[in-house]
Image (cartoon, rainbow, N blue to C red):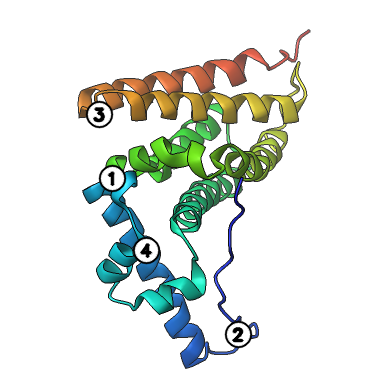
Amino acid sequence: MRTSHLPKVSQAPPGLPKSPVHVRSSVSVDAIQDATIQVLLSTGKEHLTPTRVAQRAGVSVGTLYQYYPNKSSLLHAVLRRHMEEVTRAVEAACRENKGASLQQMADALVTAFLHAKLSSVKASKALYFVSDDVGGAEIARVFGVRGTKAVAEMLASSGAIFSEDVDAMASTVMAVMSGVSRRMLESDGSPKTLEAMRKGLQVMVRAYLSACVIPCNR
């Protein structure tokens, strides 16, 4: 399995303006990753090449190769970016809903997760179908650890007494959301189908969290 080649972007010290080189590098990386998705959607994985991506991004092939040496590294990078966006959405929802009711937690979590995961159904579907080729399982595992930690901390803030360990509950919730989102990507993609599955996921997460609560009078 090929590992990611991190972009060679220098980091500006915290609190200081980014240097022109840093800004140009950040713009180039973003443009290349955006172009990778566009080429993937227009030509498919088989016909995606660094040259085509560079042309779409408006950069030279030499510039692209400074960051990504081959097609696998390009796809690995955009998949990591996608998972980072999903994970940040989960973490933000968990921070914002600490101390809320379990139903509010469930609704906010499902909404944030699916919005990030399916903000572009076509792009998400394309990444889903190439994930096995670029170590998608390991990427999902790494980001899943972060998401699970955030969910567990949110659940622990509810004040409820649970029959299950909160870490195990958080893992279950993350697994259910990931599983349903995969089925959504494999579905016909119609708004009616996606909405029905979204509602079903919301019901499942709500019901599961409620079922884990030990009533106070026991």
Label 2: few (<14), some (14–19) or many (≥20) C-alpha neighbours in 10 Å:
few
Label 1: few (<14), some (14–19) or many (≥20) C-alpha neighbours in 10 Å:
few
Q: Residue at x 39, y 36 (%)?
A: 129
Q: Which residue lies under the disc numbered 4?
A: 50
Residue 27 in view (yes/no): no
Residue 44 circle label:
1
Choose the circle earlier in sequence order: 2 or 4: 2
Q: Which residue lies under the disc numbered 3?
A: 189
- The image quarter containing residue 126 is top left
Between the C-alphas of marks 2 and 3, the distance is: 42 Å
Residue 12 circle label:
2
Q: Amino acid at mark 3?
A: Gly
Q: Residue at x 74, y 30 (%)?
A: 167
Between the C-alphas of marks 1 and 2, the distance is: 36 Å
Between the C-alphas of marks 4 and 1, the distance is: 13 Å
Q: Amino acid at mark 1?
A: Gly
Q: Please tell me how many numbered marks the rendered image carries.
A: 4
